Amino acid sequence: MTRGNQRELARKRNEKKQPKAKATSDISHTKRKEIDAEIMRQKQLKKAAEAK
């Protein structure tokens, strides 16, 4: 093995990141779509208010 423990260290770092990523995947696809749509509506309203 020419890489030493570099591969194992990278794997451990990636494991630390995984729980954070799983938090959003617990939400169903339709619920996520609704949340994203609401965020976009808020952004559009804010942009429209700034334009006036």
Image: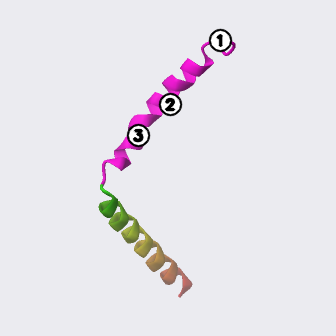
Label 1, label 2: how many angstroms apart (C-alpha)?
21 Å
The residue under label 2 is 14
Labels 3 and 1: the sequence-earlier one:
1
Q: Is residue 40 above or below residue 48?
A: above
Q: Quadrant of residue 8?
A: top right
Q: Quadrant of residue 22?
A: top left
> What range is drawn magenta here?
2-27
Residue located beneath label 3 in the image: 20
Q: Which residue is mark 1?
A: 1
Residue 12 position, x and y percent, is: 49, 23
> Which quadrant is the N terminus positioned in?
top right
Say whether residue 30 is magenta: no
Q: Residue at x 42, y 42 (%)?
A: 21
Q: Distance from label 3 to label 1 (Cα)?
A: 31 Å
Q: Name the amino acid type tagged 3.
A: Lys
Report helix, strand or loop for mark 3.
helix
Q: Using the image, determine if residue 42 lies above or below residue 2.
A: below
